[in-house]
Image: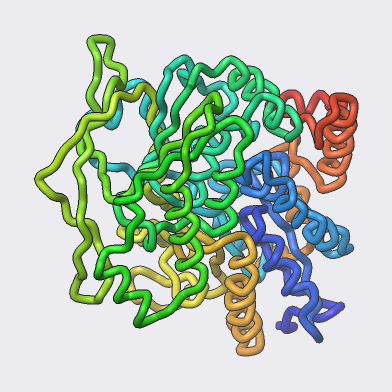
Amino acid sequence: MTQPGTEACPLRVAIVGAGPTGFYAADHLLKHEGLVAEIDLFDRLPTPFGLVRAGVAPDHQNIKAVTAAFDKVAAHPRFHFFGNVQFGRHVTVDDLRQHYHQIFYCTGAQTDRRMGIPGEDLAGSHPATEFVAWYNGHPDYRDLRFDLSQERAAVVGVGNVAVDVARILCRTSEELAATDIADYALEALRKSRIREVCLLGRRGPAQAAFTTPEIKELGELAGADIVVRPEEVALDDLSRAALERRPDRATTKKVEILQGYGQRTPSGKPRTLTVRFLVSPVELIGNSAGEVAAMRLVRNTLEATATGALQPKPKDEFEELPVGLVFRSVGYRGVPLPGVPFNESRGVILNEKGRVLDPATTRPLVGEYTGGWIKRGPTGVIGTNKPDAAETVACMVEDLAGGRTLAPAAPAAEAAERLIRERQPNCFSFQDWRSLNELEVSRGRAAGRPRVKFTRVEEMLGALGR
């Protein structure tokens, strides 16, 4: 059998998931010296770019500029995009084994972890990612409803996603109108009656997961004063000792910024953003209609675990916070893919350095790989996925050199495309996306915005005359 990877026999690779990791992996493979690869990139949405389009906050347009690099990858003649194609429905792992030498899964971490407290399922309690997907115009979430008539909302968690949610809730209508936020979300947020947003962290300021630019931005909101309790941002002895042992400029800067907020006097802006630390929700309390009416909090102190990590320990001190809207942002986990080994405890595909493992033998499966959050868990920022993808691609190239690839019965590009179009006649090419992109940008230009998104698949098809 001819070894794949040459002009006569290109290495055929299917990448499942068109977020940043998928594009980084495609780029590494297409640029690898001496390797001729053909990449077919699949996504269940008609639009590419994953969380860059559906997760990055609309008021962070500079972060979305990374798609310019992905456009260059997509321009390669041996790259093909198949959008609106769902793995497990339109194509299966067995289908891909019949048409590709290697398969790369990079579907992210699509669900929120739960808080595990009484009342979590009351009306008005939501995963933060659903709100993020809603305001970003994700087709699966655009019809959700959030009760913005409440006066106080709480966001549980102090990572960047939690900060995004809090910031969007605090933005003025004028600020939001200058972004690519979904039209329906813009209209709903214009009518919002929320006057206070509480951002709640169970540990101290030194353990907060948000980045320095994110917390700095919260102090610069046009329509919201930031309020921090000085005693909650004072470093405890354990945190101070940990920073002395391992100095970290970013952590020190975050703590300094937060302590500075603790000295501020509110200036009378229409909204208040209250940032709390060392508190954990232990119960959501409902009213007679089954809606969230309050949150019971326990105050925490920090203690060191056997590994030296600082974890919250509840004290016998409680408070009740009246609140009508709650968003949890306490971690994320991947969703199993049909036919792909999964580590349930970690919420990732079972793998070692990106090689998918057989759960029975813990040995690598031939020709199957993974990358991104579904490989390592929900850590890092967009750029973190580039070296992550490179690690997996190095394994793919090493296995190719050792002759360890799938032996597809029908490796020709035409055969795979024929199957896909038979199964999903409404699949989208990258040229379809370019046309859609031009229409969105044009609609935005007319409204003085970066773009006005199509948020239904039917709208997208109709815009392309299909």
Q: Is residue 449 above or below residue 362?
A: above
Q: In this view, does 419 lie above or below 291?
A: below
Where residue 65 appears, as percent x and y from the top left, is 77, 53
Quadrant location of the C terminus in the rendered image: top right
Residue 88 visible somewhere in the drawing? yes
Q: How many numbered badges does the structure rendering display?
A: 0
Quadrant location of the N terminus in the rendered image: bottom right
Query: Which residue corresponds to the image point at 72% horizontal and 47% vertical from the top-left?
Result: 48
Q: Quadrant of residue 311?
A: bottom left
Residue 289 relative to residue 205: left or right: left
Observer-nearest residue: 354 or 294? Answer: 294
Observer-nearest residue: 448 or 243? Answer: 243
Q: In this view, does 182 lie above or below 4?
A: above
Residue 125 relative to residue 414: left or right: left
Residue 407 visible somewhere in the drawing? no
Observer-nearest residue: 179 or 134? Answer: 179
Where residue 288 appears, as percent x and y from the top left, is 23, 10
Where residue 306 appears, as percent x and y from the top left, is 18, 75
Observer-nearest residue: 373 or 196? Answer: 196
Where residue 255 appears, as percent x and y from the top left, is 44, 60
Q: Quadrant of residue 123?
A: top left
Residue 410 relative to residue 382: left or right: right
Query: Which residue corresponds to the image point at 19% horizontal and 65% vertical from the top-left?
Result: 303
Residue lying farthest to the left in this orientation: 316
Query: Which residue corresponds to the image point at 29% horizontal and 24% vertical from the top-left?
Result: 322
Color theme of the render: rainbow
Residue 96 relative to residue 47: left or right: left
